Image (cartoon, rainbow, N blue to C red):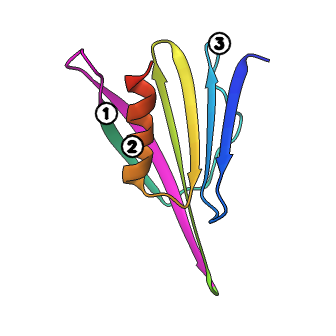
């Protein structure tokens, strides 16, 4: 397997999954989304930015509100897909910045 996978789940329903691969895009799934934005994250010590496609959806049913975001990007030759539930786009962007900063 050429894909590394990390998943964190909290008791409040927050969930973050990170897939990474040096050989190929680490996913074979396309999600239905309501929103699509391109976010720029500063690359430390370079003066450049990394553009990241973030897609998301929110479902509201009787007493149930589910939001999910998916971010796909390539940094330093590594393909990433981050899937996050019950977090904001700002928190997702912060998570991506931490990944880039520590790479």
10 Å neighbourhood of mark 3: few (<14), some, or many (≥20)?
few
Q: Earlier in the sequence, mark 3 or mark 1?
A: 3
10 Å neighbourhood of mark 1: few (<14), some, or many (≥20)?
some
User: Residue at 56% of width from left, 22% of height from top?
Assistant: 79
- Could you tell me how far apart the alpha carbons at marks 2 and 1 are, in whole angstroms? 7 Å
Q: Which residue is mark 3?
A: 23
User: Residue at 69% of width from left, 24% of height from top?
Assistant: 4
- Quadrant occupied by the C terminus: top left
Taking the view exactly as shown, the residue that stands out farthest to the right is: 1
- Residue 14 percent across, percent down from the top left: 60, 58
- Residue 58 percent across, percent down from the top left: 53, 67
| Disc assigned to residue 93 | 2
User: Residue at 48% of width from left, 49% of height from top?
Assistant: 55
For the residues bearing labels 2 and 1, Cβ distance under 8 angstroms: yes
Q: Which residue is mark 1?
A: 41
Element type at mark 3: loop
User: Residue at 50% of width from left, 55% of height from top?
Assistant: 56
- Could you tell me how far apart the alpha carbons at marks 3 and 1 are, in whole angstroms? 23 Å
């Amino acid at each position: 397997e050429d894909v590394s996978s990390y998943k964190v789940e909290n008791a409040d329903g927050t969930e973050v999954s990170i897939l990474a691969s040096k050989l190929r895009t680490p996913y074979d799934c396309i999600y239905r989304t309501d929103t699509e934005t391109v976010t720029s994250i500063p690359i430390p010590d370079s003066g450049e930015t990394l553009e990241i496609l973030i897609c998301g959806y929110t479902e509201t049913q009787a007493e149930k509100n589910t939001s999910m975001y998916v971010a796909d990007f390539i940094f330093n030759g590594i393909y990433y897909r981050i899937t996050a539930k019950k977090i904001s786009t700002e928190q997702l962007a912060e998570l991506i910045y931490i990944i880039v900063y520590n790479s």
